[in-house]
Amino acid sequence: MATIFTHLDDKCPMVDFVNLVSGKWAIPILYRLIVTDDVIRFGALQRAIAPITQKELTKQLRAFETLGLVDRTVYPEMPPRVEYQITELGKTLKPTLDSLADWMREHREQLMQASETNSINL
Amino acid sequence: MATIFTHLDDKCPMVDFVNLVSGKWAIPILYRLIVTDDVIRFGALQRAIAPITQKELTKQLRAFETLGLVDRTVYPEMPPRVEYQITELGKTLKPTLDSLADWMREHREQLMQASETNSINL
DNA sequence: CCGTATCCTAGCTGATACTG
DNA sequence: CAGTATCAGCTAGGATACGG
């Protein structure tokens, strides 16, 4: 999960961000939990953020729980049920992530065309 | 640089985002170029986003150039000079990244305390 | 100064099996 | 169902050295 604290004392908030909220799937997971704005079960979350692996989703959710961004509730039933929910702290990211989602929706086509015509790797 | 197009046809804009704008240093680099709002040389950029490696910065800048987010100008001098600048398209990310930077500045202490008391890996 | 090449480590994925 | 565990393989990232 990285969360490396070396160089966390620098002046760039974005460097702090990528050190604390690290991982390829971090932003999609937080965004999905924020949009849901309610409890959501592990399986439903994984399907919503496909194609994330079970292992990776578990790891990220544990990290967010540690950071106080996500609540985790285990129901000792059979079969087990585990529900996740964004915390109040996590919800403070909503305007930012909404903005990012809007940007992506607006520029998705242009960006994809650019990367295809300039032929990046596939 | 990843830029994987598999599953780019799903409904989550954030999954699109992490597939197009991928890499640990992507956001810090774009933010720095946006804040600078002027040409900036490779070396100055690297120092501003420390501790990014030269290799990683080069790779990311090439990807952003391909996406049309960054302009690159080479001056065939000796020693060489290469200047980078955010494009108009790239500048459309400014409100979003400003918001993210503000969020990080506001919650940095709380997040770092949480990760220390709950003792994550180092 | 800027970029590339090399080698190495860390992170992510896929598949599968197994538990409470 | 929601994990944990394993093994394998791939990709991303870091450290270092070197060349134009």
Image (cartoon, coloured by chain):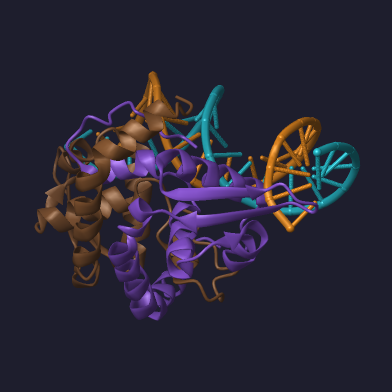
Chain colours: A purple, B brown, C cyan, D orange
Residue depicted at x 19% and y 64%? B94
Residue depicted at x 13% and y 45%? B77
| x and y, in percent, of residue B14 in the image | 45, 66
Would residue A119 be visible to someone looking at this image? Answer: no
Is B19 on the left-hand or right-hand side of B29? right
The quarter holding residue A30 reads bottom left
| x and y, in percent, of residue A52 in the image | 61, 57
| x and y, in percent, of residue A90 in the image | 37, 54
Would residue A95 be visible to someone looking at this image? Answer: yes
The quarter holding residue B9 reads bottom right
| x and y, in percent, of residue A8 in the image | 27, 31
Taking depth in this image into account, of B109 and B59 the one nearest to the observer is B109
The image shows residue A57, relative to residue C11, as above or below, that is below
Give the position of the C terminus of chain A as an image quadrant.
Answer: bottom right
Is B82 on the left-hand or right-hand side of B51? left
The image shows residue A83, relative to residue A17, as above or below, that is below
